[in-house]
Every structure is written in C-alpha cells, then in structure tokens.
C-alpha cells in the first residue's frame, strides 16, 4: 500500500527519526564530569541512550590554600587521594514536551544506570623536614601523625606523582535528569540538563584524612550539552 505524505509531514517524520551524538560538560555539587552520549530513536517520543563519562569526585571539605613561605603551589591540607569515576550508562530519553516552533522549548526526561570504575590516585606533598644540620624538603603522602598543621607543607607535589600507585574500586551509578532545549536549528543539540547522580561503590573511598569515608556519593548537577542529530529518516516502504 502506498502512503502519501506532504513535505511538512516528511519533515516531521525526519525530525522524529533522528539519532544524536552529543558531549556534556557538567558542574556537579561534588566535582566535574565530561561525557559522550549516543541516542538511538525507538519511536517518535523515546530514544535509547548509551553514555561514557569521566567524573572527578571531590569532598565538600576541600579548600585550596597557599603556604606561609611564598610558594605559588596551592594544596588541599589533609587530602589523601584524587578520586575519578569512569561510568558506562544505558537508559532512555523520553520526550515530555515537543518543540512546537522556534520559540518553544522541548523538555526530555532521562534515566541511566550502569557500572562505574573508581580510580584512586594518591596525593603527595612537599613537606618541610629538619635534622640536626638543616631543613630540607621531603616528598611524602599525607600522614596526620607526622603532619600536624599546614605550616609543615611547602606545597603540593606534581600531579603525576603517584600514578604508579593507582588503585581501582568497582561500583554502579544511577542518573535521573531533565533537559531543556531552546535551540532553533533542528539538526543541532544545544541544551541545559539538570538532575541527580547516585554512585555506589563496593568499598569506602578515602579522599580526605579528616572526613568520614563513605562508599556512596549523591550529587546534584547542571550540564551544558552540545552535538548534532543524524539525517536518518523513517523507512516509509
């Protein structure tokens, strides 16, 4: 059976059937995230999504300071490890409100779940030590038993110090969010996304020496997402 479509109807079908690829830059309540997302259309209102992201998870007690000796190397007193999370997510995007015209706003709901891999990178400090003859600088990890105040720290050691001591911890994450698209170009993605992310790991994560360790993290976030939609259209035959 042959079906006739007007040009406007074809444009509407073409819009509904576009898959998309996008990059998200995220500011979270406990750090930063960058991700790549691919969405494949299921029908006019739903898409399956696959996401790969890298998150830098921080403690709310982190405060960067300078030392009292004039060094320009900032450091966080009492920090034990940098903590990163690689997340692979699978979920759906559900269109709640369509964009009727150039002045409208499209709103989508997202949910994702998947495995995450936590990466702990030890932090080193340049510590001021002394012996009977002179003061000297010793590069060490933070130890509350021997480093009792920030005045003993000359500065932070180079970031890549400790990369040969990485440790891994497995986990899962859940992400719930909504996005708001006011972009006027039908093929472009240019939107804001906001929501919540919950990370659960198999053991407690040591980030700060003077903070309680926990195996879960809950963060609120806002993202700017940009990308493009493909030209794939519905098979009309």
Image (spheres, rainbow, N blue to C red):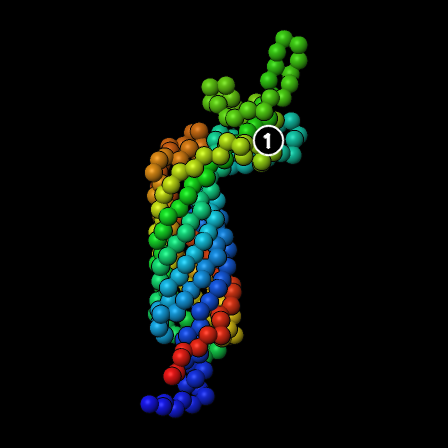
Q: Residue at x 48, y 78 (%)?
A: 102
- Where is the C terminus found, in terms of image quarters? bottom left
Q: Position of residue 194 (x, y in %)?
A: 41, 58
Q: Would you say 139 lies left or right of 109 here?
A: right
Decide which of 53, 191 is in the foreground and name it.
Answer: 53
**Mark 1 burial class by Cα count in 10 Å: few <14, some 14-19, many 20+:** many
Does residue 148 sit above or below 191 in this rendering? Answer: above
Question: Residue at the spot x=66%, y=10% of the render?
Answer: 133
Q: Residue at x 37, y 32 (%)?
A: 212
The N terminus, quarter of image = bottom left
Instruction: Pick whichever, 58 or 162, lies toward us.
Output: 162
In this view, the residue in front, 122 or 4, is: 4
Q: Position of residue 104 (x, y in %)?
A: 44, 75
Where on the picture, by quarter, is residue 71? top right
Q: Nearer the viewer, residue 7 or 176?
A: 7
**Residue 172, placed above or below residue 146:** below
Tag 1 secondary structure: loop
Give the residue pinned by disc 1.
Answer: 157
Is there any visible trace of residue 60 in the rendered image? no
Where residue 135 appears, as percent x and y from the top left, is 64, 16
* Residue located 48% across and 48% down the image: 54
């Amino acid at each position: 059976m042959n079906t006739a479509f007007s040009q406007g109807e074809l444009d509407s079908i073409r819009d509904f059937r576009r898959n998309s690829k996008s990059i998200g830059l995220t500011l979270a309540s406990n750090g930063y995230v960058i991700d790549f997302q691919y969405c494949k259309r299921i029908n006019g209102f739903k898409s399956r999504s696959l996401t790969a992201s890298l998150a830098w998870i921080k403690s709310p007690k982190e405060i960067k300071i300078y030392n009292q000796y004039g060094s320009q190397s900032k450091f966080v007193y009492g920090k034990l490890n940098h903590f990163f999370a690689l997340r692979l997510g699978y979920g759906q995007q559900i269109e709640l409100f369509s964009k009727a015209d150039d002045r409208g706003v499209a709103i989508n709901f997202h949910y994702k779940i998947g495995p995450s891999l936590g990466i702990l990178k030890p932090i080193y400090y340049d510590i001021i030590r002394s012996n009977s003859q002179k003061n000297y600088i010793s590069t060490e990890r933070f130890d509350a038993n021997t480093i009792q105040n920030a005045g003993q720290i000359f500065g932070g050691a180079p970031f890549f110090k400790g990369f040969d001591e990485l440790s891994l911890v497995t986990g899962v994450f859940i992400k719930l969010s909504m996005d708001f698209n006011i972009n006027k170009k039908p093929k472009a993605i240019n939107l804001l996304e906001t929501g919540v992310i919950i990370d659960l790991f198999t053991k407690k994560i040591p980030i700060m020496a003077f903070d309680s360790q926990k195996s879960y993290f809950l963060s609120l976030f806002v993202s700017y997402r940009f990308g493009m939609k493909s030209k794939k259209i519905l098979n009309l035959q």
